[in-house]
């Protein structure tokens, strides 16, 4: 993790492939919440079809959305976590999420 990421505090981790591209990342849930997460996603022109779930399912999915034609999800691991994991629903086919990661990395969460 780079120094800038550590200073921000709301980016918990970033999973990268060997080529350096971003596969998935984790943010601190309390900084964004589901509605804040949806707001950040709506600002990205590559994001569409955002669906927010108010009740927790067994799979921990809080939001689903399309990013450049790929299905991504915002998961709350173990349905009882302080983090949201953002990544592909199908691990076999994943775009580089570096631009989406940067959007969250550079975002100042709402107070």
Image (cartoon, rainbow, N blue to C red):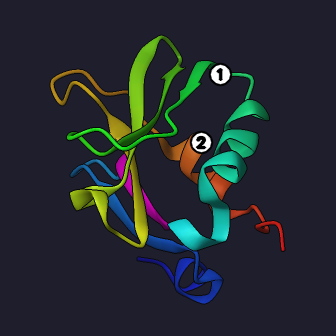
Q: Say which residue appears at 35% left-offset and 48% top-offset.
A: 24
Residue 98 included in the magenta stretch of the image = no
| 94 sits left or right of 72 in the view | left
Q: Residue at x 75, y 61 (%)?
A: 107
* Residue at the farthest front position: 55
Across and down, in percent, residue 25 comes to 40, 56
Q: Quadrant of the N terminus?
A: bottom left
User: Can I make out residue 36 in this image?
Assistant: yes
Q: Which residues fall within the magenta stretch?
A: 23-28
Q: Secondary structure at mark 2?
A: helix
Q: On the image, numbered disc 2 is attached to which residue?
A: 99
Q: Is residue 87 above or below residue 30?
A: above
Residue contact between numbered discs 1 and 2, judged by CB atoms under 8 Å: yes
For marks 1 and 2, the one nearer the N-term is: 1
Q: Is residue 21 visible?
A: no
Position in image of residue 72 (x %, y %): 40, 29
Quarter of the picture containing the C terminus is bottom right
Q: Assign the magenta stretch its main secondary structure.
A: strand
**Between marks 1 and 2 in the image, the one whose residue lies nearer the viewer:** 1
x, y percentage for residue 11? 52, 71
- Which one is in front, 99 or 40? 40
Q: Using the numbered discs, state the Cα–Cα distance from disc 1 to disc 2 in whole angstroms.
A: 10 Å
Question: Callout 2: few (<14), some (14-19), or many (20+) C-alpha neighbours within 10 Å?
Answer: few
User: 11 above or below 4?
Assistant: above
Front-most of residues 104 and 3: 104
Residue placed under numbered mark 1 in the picture: 46
Left or right: residue 84 versus residue 60 is: right
Up-down relation of residue 71 to residue 76 (above or below): above
Residue located 69% across and 47% down the image: 35
Residue at (55% x, 77% y) in the render: 5
Q: Quadrant of residue 13?
A: bottom left
């Amino acid at each position: 993790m780079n120094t800038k990421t550590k200073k921000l505090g709301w980016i918990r981790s970033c999973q990268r492939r060997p080529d350096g591209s971003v596969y998935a990342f984790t943010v601190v849930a309390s900084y964004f919440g589901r509605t804040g997460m949806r707001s950040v996603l709506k600002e990205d022109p590559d994001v569409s079809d955002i669906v927010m779930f108010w009740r927790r399912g067994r799979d921990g999915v809080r939001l689903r959305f399309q990013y450049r034609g790929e299905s991504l999800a915002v998961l709350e691991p173990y349905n009882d976590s302080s983090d949201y994991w953002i990544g592909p629903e199908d691990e076999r086919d994943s775009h580089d999420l570096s631009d989406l990661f940067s959007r969250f990395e550079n975002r100042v969460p709402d107070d």
